[in-house]
Image (tube, rainbow, N blue to C red):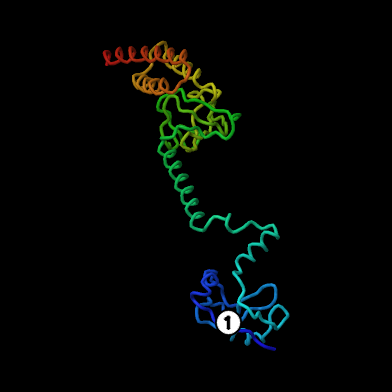
Amino acid sequence: MTIHTHTIDKRKHAEFLKEERLDIYTKGKLKPGDRIVFCAGKCQCAILLDSWKAIGSKHCDQAQTLKEFPKSHKKKLKLKRKSAHFPSPSYRPSHRVSRFLIFVFLLCTGFIITLSQQGLLNIPFINTPADPVMIMTGAGVYLRTEPEWKTKWIKSLQIGTIVRPLETRRIKEQYWYQVVTPTHEKGWVPSKYTMSIDYHKREKAYIKVAEKKLNEKNGKTSYGDLVDLSHFLNRVIQEVTQAEIATKLKQLHSLTLQRLKKSQAVR
């Protein structure tokens, strides 16, 4: 049986070399100057002459080799993949592109988490629109690790902070809520400093919170509470979209500032 051999030429077989084929026996890359044979079967594998002899001069159940150097094998592979309903490699993103997209995704995710943890994204931890939410009506209410007054606290929650309740407990005639804050801290707060609201109608709730704070204790709201209320109203006035509500909040803010001046005079 005649073995048809070919010597790879750098110029003549440039397209073949671009395919960067590997020898099926040594797994080494075929390079210019190598003496090779082509299996005459459907695979048309390029095999080093020494490797061909090492495997018994037989591949694809036959011992014949191609007399002519075949055209680019890549085109045949593309046709084969297309007929087998596989997507063409040209539509697949390169490893560099895939890695870049993954990097951008992780970078953006980390950036959002960092902003959230720093409180720069005031987005309540709400899974669905149906989730119940509460708004804090007390100033400087401690978010505690356990539903008890003497336990450690995680952070201080200001008037207007929106939280999502997870669990309710009654401890010594006092109800406590386990909540999640907009910056994803989890802890317990006393129920008396909260108000249940509809998150999508929270602008109206802002008015109720301010009126409740100004009217408590017969108008004797503490100086610290008034300062916190002033900060809250100043923030939400910029947030609301309804002109009527914005006007009402401005009136409440003016009233709060008047109360502050009186409190300063007394102090």
**What amino acid is at disc 1?**
His
Taking the spot 60% from the left edge, 77% from the top edge, the residue there is 69
Side (left or right) of 68 relative to 180: right
Residue sitting nearer the eye, 57 or 163? 57
SS for tag 1?
strand
Taking the spot 63% from the left edge, 78% from the top edge, the residue there is 68
- The answer to whether 39 is drawn above or below residue 160 in the figure is below
- Where residue 88 appears, as percent x and y from the top left, is 62, 57
- Where residue 191 appears, as percent x and y from the top left, is 52, 26
Residue sitting nearer the eye, 161 or 19? 19
Side (left or right) of 232 relative to 62: left
Find residue 235 and report its image quarter. Answer: top left
Side (left or right) of 223 relative to 94: left
Mark 1 highlights which residue? 6
Taking the spot 72% from the left edge, 81% from the top edge, the residue there is 62
Q: Quadrant of the N terminus?
A: bottom right
